[in-house]
Amino acid sequence: MITEDYLCRIGVSLPNNLLGQFDEILKYRQYTSRSEGIRDAIRIYTINNQWISDSTGLRKGVITIVYNFRTANLFEFISDIRNQYRDAIQTIFMRQVSEERRVEIMVVRGTSTELRELADSLAEKKGIESVRITTVSLS
């Protein structure tokens, strides 16, 4: 359902494999069109990232990381980041999900700037496949 009064048309260029993956998800979720799926994806992306502009007050949330733990020096890198942000990281859960991949969930508390820096510092390293952050305001 579209609640906006006015629709804008945009053009998007995508690699074939990404479009194929997107189409598979649309089919599975029973979207009636790509436009509907793109609108939904943009809405979710916007909601998930609105907190970035809120630099005041404390936030609490989770950072989820998926990484290849056999990548050279990656474990040491993550340990260094954990140590650097030890005041913001409250709890860590780790689980090996395959021979080479691990998922790690950090329960975090801090300012949006601090938590964004933590997530960004993790995302920059080769071997880390995904970093997702979800937070809520404590005020």
Image: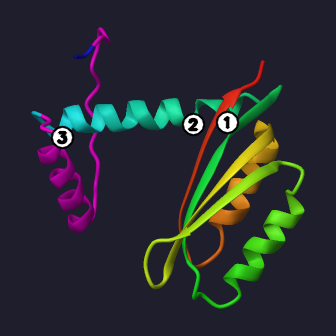
Is residue 136 positioned above or below 71 on the image? above
**Spatial separation of the CA atoms under disc 2 and disc 3:** 23 Å
Dot 3 alpha-carbon crowd within 10 angstroms: few under 14, some 14 to 19, many 20 or more: few
Is residue 72 positioned above or below 68 on the image? below
**Spatial separation of the CA atoms under disc 1 and disc 3:** 29 Å
First in sequence, mark 2 or 3: give its number: 3
In the rendered structure, are the residues bearing label 1 and label 2 in contact, judged by CB atoms less than 8 Å apart?
A: yes
Residue at 76%, 37% (x, y): give it.
Answer: 112
Residue at 25%, 31% (x, y): give it.
Answer: 9
> What residue range appears in magenta?
3-31
Query: Where does label 1 land, which residue?
Result: 52
> Can you tell which of label 1 and label 3 is closer to the viewer?
3
Quadrant where the N terminus is found in the figure:
top left
Inspect the image, locate mark 2, and give the three-letter code of the amino acid beneath it: Asn
Is residue 18 positioned above or below 96 on the image? above
Query: Where does label 2 land, which residue?
Result: 49
Counting from the top left corner in percent of width and height, residue 110 is at 82, 39
Circle 2 — which element? Answer: helix
Residue at 65%, 31% (x, y): give it.
Answer: 51
Is residue 117 positioned above or below 71 on the image? above
Q: In the picture, residue 11 is in which quadrant?
A: top left
User: Which of the numbered marks, if any, corresponds to residue 36?
Assistant: none
Quadrant where the C terminus is found in the figure:
top right
Query: Where does label 3 land, which residue?
Result: 29
